[in-house]
Image (cartoon, rainbow, N blue to C red):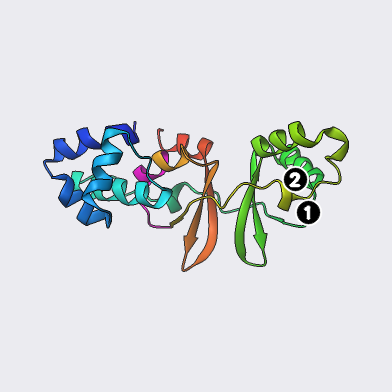
Amino acid sequence: MLPRIDSIKQIRQKIGITQKKLASMTGVSTSMINQIESGRSQPSYETAKKVFESLAKLEGESSSHTAGDFCSKDIVKLKQTNTLHDAIKKMHELSISQIPIFEKSDVIGVISEDGIVRHLAEVGATELKKSRIIDTMDPLPPIVDFDTPANVLVPLIRYSKCILISKKSKIIGIITASDTLKMME
């Protein structure tokens, strides 16, 4: 199993580096590393990604797998002007639980089953067909590079419904929690 946020200290100590060295490698303050390790602060997606990439690099992980090896390249997309009914229908047809929302070629958020259920609880079933995705979508999920080491993905997926994969600034794939299970095989 890949490391959890609360195991950063143990991994760092096992490798034999200081908080100052890890902070310098990840571009955050030593104080932030201390707060993360003590549980007083939860890192942002980007900070968590940088910390795990740095730790993996230092551990000398022999795995050559990357995010690109595990992502689904057929991305189902919706627009912010689509309705929740459109999203529910697409999720049901394809047996998926989240769909990235695009405005032209830019990702602006994600619609998820959880978000739809929250919205349903707030507005009621009668309003569901009229509701637009823009009113219900979750914030932008993390976006990682195609070459990001695979061992960085599991900690990130804990904080998000999905991870989008980019190559040359273009979204080319998506990884969900079920995709991370492929890494265990």
Residue type at tag 1: Asn
Rounded to the nearest angstrom, the CA distance separating label 2 from label 1 is: 7 Å
Q: Earlier in the sequence, mark 2 or mark 1?
A: 1
Q: Nearer the viewer, residue 143 or 185?
A: 143
Mark 1 — residue? 82
Res 82 quadrant in image: bottom right
Q: Is 103 situated left or right of 139 in this image?
A: right
Above-or-below relation of 171 to 94? below
Pointer 2 and pointer 1: residues touching (CB < 8 Å)?
yes
> Residue lying farthest left?
16
Q: Which mark is residue 87?
A: 2
Q: Quadrant of residue 9?
A: top left
Q: Position of residue 36 (x, y in %)?
A: 30, 40
Q: Is 156 in the magenta?
A: no
- Marker count (numbered): 2
Residue at coordinates 53% horizontally, 35% vertically from top-left?
178
Q: Give the residue displayed 55% in from the left and 41% down from the top.
A: 161
Q: Observer-nearest residue: 3 or 47? A: 47
For mark 2, give the secondary structure: helix
Residue range corresponding to the magenta coloring: 146-154
Give coordinates of residue 17: x percent, y percent.
13, 44
**Is 173 displayed left or right of 137 in the figure?**
left
Residue 173 appears left or right of 67? right
Which quadrant, please, contains the C terminus? top left
- Residue 7 percent coordinates (x, y): 28, 32
In the image, is residue 109 above or below residue 37? below
- Inspect this view and state whether residue 93 appears: yes
Instruction: Tell me if mark 2 has few (under 14), some (14-19) or many (20+) residues whose alpha carbon lies within 10 angstroms of its own.
Output: many
